[in-house]
Amino acid sequence: MSCLFCAIVAGDIPSRQVYADDHAIAFLDIAPWHVGHTLVVPRRHVDDLLGEPEALTEIVPAINAASRLLVERLAADGLNLVSSTGVAAGQEVFHFHVHLVPRFAHRAGLRELFVHEPDVDLDRVHRQLVGDQP
């Protein structure tokens, strides 16, 4: 399978999933900008937002549920929602996705958004978000 996110959706590549429904899954980004940085992707392959604008509507419930989970369980002070369409915008995986980035007062503001958080323990964050669920 040539699409990384399709392989994750299919379960062929492991992920630290924090939410799933019939239309989307949400999982921790392996190179987080901040603690809890999560990607929400549609289960069906859609290249980007412009290719099929209705895909955004389909994943809104997952975006909402995952956002609330991140803010509540990580005690975040805010959250950024980011999506890129096309190479010029920085899209690297060509399967539509939305970044949910919990934000904390000690690193506030847009200038701090894209600075990777060093040494995030993804397993600890995953346990904090979903507990011992399979």
Image: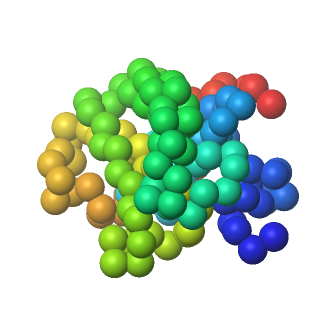
Instruction: Let me know if residue 129 appears in the view.
Output: yes
Task: Check the image and report above or below for 111 versus 87.
Answer: above
Residue at horizontal 15 percent and vertical 48 percent from the top: 109
Picture quadrant of residue 27: top right
- Tell which of 88 and 50 is nearer to you: 50
Instruction: Let me know if residue 97 appears in the view.
Output: no
Quadrant housing the N terminus: bottom right
Left or right: residue 117 versus residue 2 is left
Left or right: residue 37 versus residue 55 is left
Residue 57 % position (x, y): 49, 36
- Tell which of 83 and 124 is nearer to you: 83
Residue 59 % position (x, y): 54, 37
Residue 110 % position (x, y): 18, 53
Residue at horizontal 72 percent and vertical 58 percent from the top: 6
Task: Check the image and report above or below for 15 versus 87.
Answer: above
Picture quadrant of residue 74: top left
Quadrant housing the C terminus: top right
- Tell which of 33 and 7 is nearer to you: 7
Task: Check the image and report above or below for 59 versus 8.
Answer: above
